[in-house]
Amino acid sequence: MSIHWARGRKLAQSLAARRFPGRLLAICAAALMLGWPAIYSGFPLLFPDSMTYLDDGRTVARAVFLHQFSDYYGMRSFYYSLGILPFHWNVTAWPVVGLQNLIIAWVVWLVVRSFVAHRTAGYYLILMMFLSLLTGMGWYASFIMPDILGPVLYLSIYLLVCAPETLSRGERIALYPMGVWAITGHATHLPLAVALCALLALISACQGRDFLRRARGLAEVAAMIALAAAAQIALHGYLYGKPTLNGERPPYLMVRIIADGPGRWYLEKHCASEQWVACKRAAGLSDDANSLLWDADGFYDGATDEEADRLAEEETPFVLAAVRSYPREQFLRSAANFGEQLTTFGLFGFHPNDWTLEQFNEAMPAARASYLRSRQARNALPLRLLSTIQLYAVLVSLAAMAVLIPLLWRRHSPRLAGLSLVIVSVIVLNALLTGVLSGPDDRYQGRVIWLVPLLAGIYLMDWLVQRKASEETTQAGSSAGTGRGVRASAAAMKTMGKNSSV
């Protein structure tokens, strides 16, 4: 196993050195393909949260670098805001799209190369064309949101744990800061990374010898997770004066429990005897989580600063009390949310939003006119058609994998098994985490569902490569057999000639 690992590492390094220009051109071409949704729309794709990320970066940067503190820094990922700040400076968001496209194009290149060591560019570009045109991959890469960093993280974990011998030292080192940034980019990425690392460690331990081969990669991923968590705690501690992992986030879980029903029933039954802040609005609580959070007279956005602080303190005790009172009802509601989220992955999150337009004057005033001319702002994107195309791409991919699995699994490829485990786990865990804790939404599952067609493409490539290798081996055997036959015939003729002369 160690000999195979060393040979793989040597091959990766030699290929990286010899084919750098071609690799760079292929990655840049793929990044350009991924950017077509933004180019077609006429402006980088935006969501209401996008404006927060664009605006908060400079506020946090002033506090970190100039010690100019503020009373409010926002409720999103500060590290994503800081990471994209040098690429937009509140002037234009196009460089952010270029950055995200290049990152995901490079990571997918490494994944493809882990299965196709020769003629990688051809296979890679065909796959990227398929993914960019028929799935939401390009839409999320062109989206000013940290959503695309989730797949970057999950594929990086596959590379470090399941295919480290295919990486050069420089590629391996480059994955570390990228993985840490991806983990800090969104609240869901940290728990998903922890669950994925634990699952890979458990399966590797059960396989015995493979655990030692993967131990280094697992340790690196664990170190990335620990560093990301420490970085978040440290930054929040610096900004707020108290170390927290999530900062000043809204009470998402409390709102979810209320919208599901058990939280609302609990308030109706106990508000007469218990003094929860939510009791002040118990009579008019909606069953829509977004309304509870963001309506002007809603549960959270309409609260005073003092009430918001109390809501944060009461969230965990309230959730536990409501779940203890209605365990069966909450389990059934959460299971239904999970099932719905698993199959909800359209591209309808790219509709225009009035709040987004209102925030341009603060986040990016010079770009407002350009955005107004975009197809997204005019609600002219064919989102229903594109969502249908993606649905069929996912269904065809699942059918193709069902056909290819019996053909490929006889080889017992650890890399193919590792990538399959990572992607299937991410699809399920992402739906579980977002559906149960936040509620079903097209965007949540849409940001990872394109990994299914990616996996199907890898299956097909691996099958084609192995089939070609098998044919070449057969041809080589036939040629060798023919050569031995010719040599034997010549020797026989020579012997017959000698016998004749005698």
Image (spheres, rainbow, N blue to C red):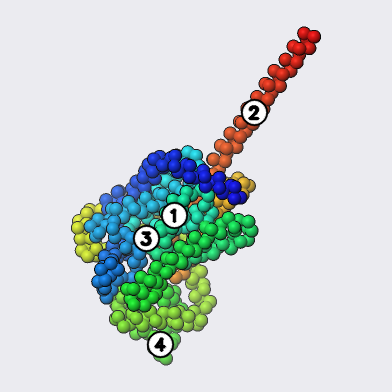
Q: Amino acid at mark 2?
A: Ala
In the figure, is residue 134 to the left or right of 472? left
Residues under numbered marks 1 and 4 in contact, where contact means CB atoms less than 8 Å apart:
no
Residues under numbered marks 3 and 4 in contact, where contact means CB atoms less than 8 Å apart:
no
Foreground mark, 3 or 1? 1
Q: Residue at x 31, y 70 (%)?
A: 74
Foreground mark, 3 or 4? 3
Residues under numbered marks 4 and 2 in contact, where contact means CB atoms less than 8 Å apart:
no
In the figure, is residue 278 to the left or right of 167? left
Residue beneath disc 1 = 173
Between the C-alphas of marks 3 and 2, the distance is 56 Å
> From the viewer's perspective, is residue 146 above or below residue 6?
below
Between the C-alphas of marks 1 and 4, the distance is 55 Å
Asked where in the image residue 295 lies, by quadrant, the reply is bottom left
CA neighbours of label 3 inside 10 A, class few (<14), some (14 to 19), many (20+):
many
Between the C-alphas of marks 3 and 1, the distance is 22 Å
Q: Secondary structure at mark 2?
A: helix
> From the viewer's perspective, is residue 474 above or below residue 62?
above
Numbered badge on residue 146:
3
Q: Mark 1 or mark 4, which has the lower sequence index?
A: 1
